[in-house]
Image (tube, grey):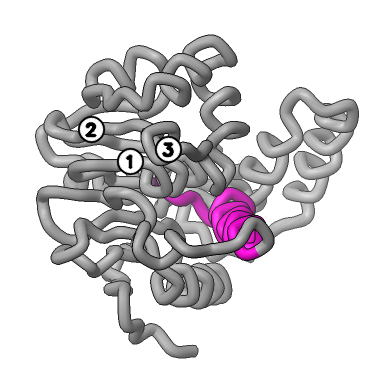
Amino acid sequence: MNTTFQSLLFEVDEQGICTISINRPEKLNALNNQVFLDLDDALTAADQNPEIRVVIVTGVGEKAFVAGADIKEFAEFTSQQATDLSTRGHRVFQKIEDLSKPVIAAVNGFALGGGCELAMACHIRIASKTAKLGLPEVTLGLIPGYGGTQRLVALCGKAKALELMMTGNFISAEEAEKIGLVNSVSDSAMEAATALAAKMAKQAPLALKNAIKAVAKAGQNDGYLTEATLFGELFATEDFKEGTSAFFEKRKPSFSGK
Protein backbone atom coordinates (compact mmCIF):
# COMPACT_ATOMS: atom_id res chain seq x y z
CA MET A 1 0.00 0.00 0.00
CA ASN A 2 1.20 3.49 -0.84
CA THR A 3 2.83 5.31 2.06
CA THR A 4 4.06 8.31 0.09
CA PHE A 5 1.71 11.27 0.18
CA GLN A 6 1.59 14.80 -1.22
CA SER A 7 0.65 16.52 2.01
CA LEU A 8 1.80 14.09 4.72
CA LEU A 9 4.93 12.41 5.98
CA PHE A 10 4.41 8.76 6.93
CA GLU A 11 7.15 7.12 9.01
CA VAL A 12 7.34 3.88 10.99
CA ASP A 13 10.10 3.17 13.51
CA GLU A 14 11.49 -0.13 14.80
CA GLN A 15 9.06 -0.11 17.75
CA GLY A 16 6.06 -0.12 15.46
CA ILE A 17 5.24 3.54 16.07
CA CYS A 18 3.82 5.24 12.98
CA THR A 19 4.10 9.03 12.78
CA ILE A 20 1.75 10.83 10.40
CA SER A 21 2.83 14.46 10.03
CA ILE A 22 0.73 17.08 8.24
CA ASN A 23 3.31 18.61 5.90
CA ARG A 24 2.15 22.09 4.82
CA PRO A 25 4.28 24.28 7.11
CA GLU A 26 4.06 27.24 4.74
CA LYS A 27 0.27 27.18 5.32
CA LEU A 28 0.61 26.34 9.04
CA ASN A 29 -0.48 22.80 8.07
CA ALA A 30 -4.00 23.98 7.23
CA LEU A 31 -6.43 21.25 6.21
CA ASN A 32 -7.40 21.17 2.56
CA ASN A 33 -8.86 18.56 0.23
CA GLN A 34 -5.49 16.94 -0.42
CA VAL A 35 -4.78 16.58 3.29
CA PHE A 36 -8.09 14.81 3.81
CA LEU A 37 -7.47 12.48 0.86
CA ASP A 38 -3.99 11.66 2.09
CA LEU A 39 -5.04 11.32 5.73
CA ASP A 40 -7.79 8.90 4.77
CA ASP A 41 -5.31 6.71 2.86
CA ALA A 42 -2.63 6.99 5.57
CA LEU A 43 -5.07 5.83 8.25
CA THR A 44 -6.02 2.82 6.13
CA ALA A 45 -2.35 1.98 5.62
CA ALA A 46 -1.64 2.24 9.35
CA ASP A 47 -4.67 0.19 10.31
CA GLN A 48 -3.88 -2.62 7.88
CA ASN A 49 -0.16 -2.93 8.68
CA PRO A 50 0.29 -5.51 11.47
CA GLU A 51 3.77 -4.14 12.24
CA ILE A 52 2.28 -0.79 13.29
CA ARG A 53 1.20 -0.79 16.93
CA VAL A 54 0.54 2.92 17.66
CA VAL A 55 -0.04 6.04 15.55
CA ILE A 56 1.10 9.58 16.36
CA VAL A 57 -0.46 12.50 14.46
CA THR A 58 1.43 15.80 14.42
CA GLY A 59 2.31 18.78 12.23
CA VAL A 60 5.59 19.67 10.57
CA GLY A 61 7.38 22.65 12.13
CA GLU A 62 7.15 24.28 15.53
CA LYS A 63 4.48 26.88 14.75
CA ALA A 64 1.48 24.69 14.14
CA PHE A 65 -0.04 21.29 14.68
CA VAL A 66 -2.82 22.32 12.31
CA ALA A 67 -3.86 25.97 12.34
CA GLY A 68 -7.31 25.23 10.93
CA ALA A 69 -9.01 24.60 7.62
CA ASP A 70 -7.82 26.20 4.39
CA ILE A 71 -10.45 28.97 4.20
CA LYS A 72 -9.59 29.87 0.61
CA GLU A 73 -10.78 26.45 -0.46
CA PHE A 74 -14.35 26.85 0.80
CA ALA A 75 -14.95 30.62 0.94
CA GLU A 76 -17.31 30.48 -2.08
CA PHE A 77 -19.06 27.22 -1.24
CA THR A 78 -22.83 26.82 -1.38
CA SER A 79 -24.70 25.45 1.63
CA GLN A 80 -24.82 21.99 0.06
CA GLN A 81 -21.10 22.03 -0.72
CA ALA A 82 -20.40 23.07 2.87
CA THR A 83 -22.58 20.27 4.21
CA ASP A 84 -20.72 17.79 2.02
CA LEU A 85 -17.40 19.20 3.27
CA SER A 86 -18.49 18.74 6.87
CA THR A 87 -19.71 15.20 6.22
CA ARG A 88 -16.38 14.28 4.64
CA GLY A 89 -14.54 15.66 7.65
CA HIS A 90 -16.79 13.68 9.98
CA ARG A 91 -16.02 10.47 8.11
CA VAL A 92 -12.24 10.88 8.15
CA PHE A 93 -12.08 12.03 11.76
CA GLN A 94 -14.38 9.21 12.85
CA LYS A 95 -11.97 6.86 11.12
CA ILE A 96 -9.30 8.13 13.52
CA GLU A 97 -11.53 7.61 16.54
CA ASP A 98 -12.46 4.10 15.36
CA LEU A 99 -8.93 3.03 14.40
CA SER A 100 -7.99 -0.33 15.89
CA LYS A 101 -4.70 1.09 17.19
CA PRO A 102 -4.10 3.92 19.68
CA VAL A 103 -3.82 7.34 18.05
CA ILE A 104 -1.96 10.08 19.92
CA ALA A 105 -2.01 13.73 18.86
CA ALA A 106 1.30 15.52 19.48
CA VAL A 107 0.08 19.12 19.51
CA ASN A 108 3.18 21.14 18.73
CA GLY A 109 1.78 24.64 18.16
CA PHE A 110 -1.51 26.14 16.99
CA ALA A 111 -4.40 23.65 16.99
CA LEU A 112 -7.28 25.82 15.89
CA GLY A 113 -10.62 25.11 14.27
CA GLY A 114 -10.24 21.97 12.18
CA GLY A 115 -6.85 21.40 13.78
CA CYS A 116 -8.37 21.28 17.24
CA GLU A 117 -11.06 18.98 15.87
CA LEU A 118 -8.37 16.70 14.43
CA ALA A 119 -6.66 16.54 17.81
CA MET A 120 -9.96 15.78 19.55
CA ALA A 121 -10.59 12.86 17.18
CA CYS A 122 -7.38 11.22 18.42
CA HIS A 123 -7.60 8.97 21.45
CA ILE A 124 -5.04 10.94 23.47
CA ARG A 125 -3.64 14.48 23.18
CA ILE A 126 -0.20 15.62 24.35
CA ALA A 127 0.50 19.35 24.01
CA SER A 128 3.71 21.33 24.01
CA LYS A 129 3.90 24.18 26.53
CA THR A 130 3.68 26.71 23.70
CA ALA A 131 0.58 25.16 22.10
CA LYS A 132 -2.59 27.20 21.62
CA LEU A 133 -5.96 25.53 21.11
CA GLY A 134 -9.35 26.86 20.17
CA LEU A 135 -12.43 26.76 17.96
CA PRO A 136 -12.64 30.27 16.48
CA GLU A 137 -15.19 29.49 13.76
CA VAL A 138 -17.64 32.11 15.11
CA THR A 139 -15.21 34.80 13.98
CA LEU A 140 -16.02 33.65 10.41
CA GLY A 141 -19.74 33.44 11.07
CA LEU A 142 -19.55 29.65 11.35
CA ILE A 143 -19.54 26.82 13.87
CA PRO A 144 -17.16 23.86 14.04
CA GLY A 145 -17.97 21.42 11.25
CA TYR A 146 -15.66 18.45 11.73
CA GLY A 147 -17.20 17.05 14.90
CA GLY A 148 -16.01 19.75 17.28
CA THR A 149 -19.43 20.57 18.72
CA GLN A 150 -19.79 16.95 19.81
CA ARG A 151 -16.29 15.96 20.89
CA LEU A 152 -15.56 19.14 22.85
CA VAL A 153 -18.69 18.59 24.95
CA ALA A 154 -17.64 14.99 25.63
CA LEU A 155 -14.17 16.10 26.73
CA CYS A 156 -14.86 19.34 28.59
CA GLY A 157 -18.57 19.48 29.35
CA LYS A 158 -21.36 21.51 27.77
CA ALA A 159 -20.78 24.85 29.51
CA LYS A 160 -17.03 25.06 28.82
CA ALA A 161 -17.53 23.84 25.25
CA LEU A 162 -20.11 26.55 24.59
CA GLU A 163 -17.86 29.18 26.15
CA LEU A 164 -14.95 28.28 23.87
CA MET A 165 -17.11 28.01 20.75
CA MET A 166 -19.11 31.19 21.35
CA THR A 167 -16.11 33.40 22.20
CA GLY A 168 -13.65 31.92 19.72
CA ASN A 169 -10.97 32.27 22.39
CA PHE A 170 -7.61 30.53 22.12
CA ILE A 171 -6.47 28.81 25.29
CA SER A 172 -3.02 27.80 26.51
CA ALA A 173 -1.85 24.22 26.81
CA GLU A 174 -2.06 24.52 30.60
CA GLU A 175 -5.68 25.66 30.45
CA ALA A 176 -6.45 22.90 27.95
CA GLU A 177 -5.07 20.33 30.38
CA LYS A 178 -7.07 21.86 33.23
CA ILE A 179 -10.38 21.46 31.39
CA GLY A 180 -9.58 18.00 30.02
CA LEU A 181 -8.99 18.98 26.41
CA VAL A 182 -5.45 17.55 26.50
CA ASN A 183 -4.07 14.73 28.62
CA SER A 184 -0.78 16.37 29.51
CA VAL A 185 1.65 19.18 28.69
CA SER A 186 5.34 18.74 27.95
CA ASP A 187 8.36 20.74 26.81
CA SER A 188 8.30 18.52 23.71
CA ALA A 189 4.93 17.12 22.70
CA MET A 190 6.57 14.76 20.23
CA GLU A 191 9.04 13.34 22.74
CA ALA A 192 6.30 12.81 25.31
CA ALA A 193 3.97 11.27 22.72
CA THR A 194 6.70 8.92 21.52
CA ALA A 195 7.47 7.79 25.08
CA LEU A 196 3.79 7.09 25.68
CA ALA A 197 3.45 5.32 22.34
CA ALA A 198 6.47 3.14 23.11
CA LYS A 199 4.80 1.92 26.30
CA MET A 200 1.57 1.17 24.43
CA ALA A 201 3.45 -0.58 21.62
CA LYS A 202 4.62 -3.23 24.11
CA GLN A 203 1.07 -4.18 25.07
CA ALA A 204 -1.17 -6.78 23.42
CA PRO A 205 -2.50 -5.28 20.16
CA LEU A 206 -5.84 -7.08 20.36
CA ALA A 207 -6.34 -5.88 23.92
CA LEU A 208 -5.67 -2.30 22.81
CA LYS A 209 -8.12 -2.74 19.94
CA ASN A 210 -10.84 -4.06 22.22
CA ALA A 211 -10.23 -1.34 24.79
CA ILE A 212 -10.81 1.28 22.08
CA LYS A 213 -14.01 -0.47 20.97
CA ALA A 214 -15.32 -0.84 24.52
CA VAL A 215 -14.63 2.77 25.50
CA ALA A 216 -16.45 3.93 22.34
CA LYS A 217 -19.60 2.44 23.88
CA ALA A 218 -19.23 4.31 27.19
CA GLY A 219 -22.55 5.77 28.31
CA GLN A 220 -24.59 3.72 25.84
CA ASN A 221 -27.17 1.12 26.82
CA ASP A 222 -25.08 -1.77 25.49
CA GLY A 223 -21.78 -0.52 26.92
CA TYR A 224 -21.46 -3.14 29.65
CA LEU A 225 -22.57 -5.96 27.36
CA THR A 226 -20.01 -4.85 24.77
CA GLU A 227 -17.30 -4.81 27.43
CA ALA A 228 -18.19 -8.33 28.60
CA THR A 229 -18.19 -9.66 25.04
CA LEU A 230 -14.87 -8.06 24.12
CA PHE A 231 -13.36 -9.19 27.44
CA GLY A 232 -14.42 -12.76 26.71
CA GLU A 233 -13.08 -12.69 23.16
CA LEU A 234 -9.56 -12.00 24.41
CA PHE A 235 -9.46 -15.27 26.38
CA ALA A 236 -9.22 -17.11 23.04
CA THR A 237 -6.12 -15.20 21.90
CA GLU A 238 -2.50 -16.29 21.94
CA ASP A 239 -1.62 -12.98 23.56
CA PHE A 240 -3.76 -13.83 26.60
CA LYS A 241 -1.92 -17.12 26.97
CA GLU A 242 1.41 -15.30 26.60
CA GLY A 243 0.42 -12.63 29.10
CA THR A 244 -0.67 -15.07 31.76
CA SER A 245 2.37 -17.31 31.17
CA ALA A 246 4.67 -14.31 31.51
CA PHE A 247 2.91 -13.35 34.74
CA PHE A 248 3.39 -16.76 36.31
CA GLU A 249 6.96 -17.03 35.02
CA LYS A 250 7.79 -13.54 36.31
CA ARG A 251 9.01 -12.24 32.95
CA LYS A 252 7.95 -9.55 30.50
CA PRO A 253 5.45 -10.73 27.88
CA SER A 254 6.15 -10.67 24.17
CA PHE A 255 2.86 -10.12 22.36
CA SER A 256 2.30 -11.19 18.74
CA GLY A 257 -1.10 -9.64 18.09
CA LYS A 258 -2.72 -13.03 17.63
The secondary structure making up most of the magenta span is helix
Location of the C terminus (image quadrant): bottom right
Q: From what the image shows, is residue 42 above or below residue 153?
A: below
Identify the element where label 1 is drawn. Answer: strand
The residue under label 3 is: 137
Of the residues shown, which amino acid type is indicated by label 3? Glu
Point out residue 160 in the picture as x, y percentages from the top left corner: 48, 13
Other-residue count near label 1 (Cα within 10 Å), few / some / many at <14 / 14–19 / ≥20: many
Of the residues shown, which amino acid type is indicated by label 2? Lys
Whether residue 246 is visible, yes or no, is yes
Q: CA distance from mark 3 to mark 2?
A: 15 Å
**Looking at the image, is mark 3 or mark 2 nearer the viewer?**
3
Residue 108 as seen in the image, left or right of residue 10: left
Of the residues shown, which amino acid type is indicated by label 1? Leu
Q: CA distance from mark 1 to mark 2?
A: 8 Å
Residue 169: numbered disc? none
Other-residue count near label 3 (Cα within 10 Å), few / some / many at <14 / 14–19 / ≥20: many
Q: Residue at x 27, y 23 (%)?
A: 171
Q: Earlier in the sequence, mark 1 or mark 2?
A: 1
Q: Residue at x 51, y 77 (%)?
A: 41
Residue 132: numbered disc? 2
Which range is magenta? 81-104
Other-residue count near label 2 (Cα within 10 Å), few / some / many at <14 / 14–19 / ≥20: many
- Residue 13 forms part of the magenta stretch: no
Q: Badges 1 and 2: C-beta atoms under 8 Å apart?
A: yes
The residue under label 1 is: 112
